[in-house]
Image (cartoon, grey):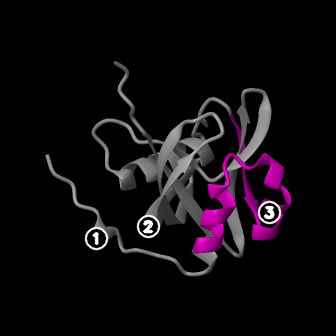
Amino acid sequence: MRTWLPRVTVATIVERDGLFLMVEEDVHGELKLNQPAGHLEADETLIEAAARETLEETAWQVEIDYLVEFSQWTSESGNHYLRACFAGTALELIPDQTLDDGILRAVWLSRDEVAARQEQLRSPLVLHHIDHYINGKQTPLEIFSYYD
């Protein structure tokens, strides 16, 4: 019997001067656009995962400020994702940081520039979460509790 497990992922919206920190990545030979995002790893919190993934994919160290949305989404391939999307503040660019495999570069784009690349978005949640951020959707980080 096969066990069904959702994929737990995090994403971070980082906005500066009306531009959003995005990543261009090679996904099975296709150019995709996403927020800095990735999977929760063992022995880390969702907040730690969001900060780590942002650094690994963009070379930007960030402070996670609040939760934008916790989403469930099923991809066209049938994978089920639980995605915690956070808002963060860019603190420092780490110039010697090696980017994750598949990440081509980090770019700063306006909401309209992201929307214009709709066909390249990694998932519909990318623009959805930017719009929630712009509209002020936020939940304090105190909502999370962690138990050993």
Element type at mark 2: strand
Instruction: Point out residue 120 in the picture as x, y percentages from the top left corner.
Output: 79, 47
Task: Decide if residue 132 is on the left or right side of residue 145.
Answer: right
Q: Which residue is mark 2?
A: 67
Q: Residue furthest left?
A: 148
Task: Decide if residue 55 is on the left or right side of residue 101.
Answer: left
Residue 112: say if magenta.
yes
Look at 58% across and 62% down and name the residue there: 13
Q: Which label number is shown at residue 142?
A: 1
Query: In the picture, which quadrant includes the N terminus?
Result: top left
Task: Decide if residue 80 is on the left or right side of residue 45.
Answer: right
Distance from Cα at disc 3 to Cα at disc 1:
32 Å
Distance from Cα at disc 1 to Cα at disc 2:
10 Å
Instruction: Point out residue 129 in the picture as x, y percentages from the top left corner.
Output: 60, 64
Element type at mark 1: helix
| Three-letter code, disc 2 | Leu
| Three-letter code, disc 3 | Ala
Distance from Cα at disc 3 to Cα at disc 2:
22 Å
- Of 131 and 18, nearer the camera is 131
Q: Which label number is shown at residue 115?
A: 3
- Of 124 and 113, nearer the camera is 124
Q: Residues within 10 Å of mark 3 (few under 14, many from 20)?
A: some
Look at 72% across and 43% down and name the residue there: 105
- Of 121 and 16, nearer the camera is 121
Question: Closer to the N terminus: mark 3 or mark 1?
Answer: 3
- Tell me where residue 76 sits by quadrant: top right
Q: Residue furthest front?
A: 1
Q: Residues within 10 Å of mark 2 (few under 14, many from 20)?
A: many
Residue contact at pointers 3 and 1, CB within 8 angstroms: no
Q: Nearer the viewer, mark 3 or mark 1?
A: 3
Magenta segment range? 103-132
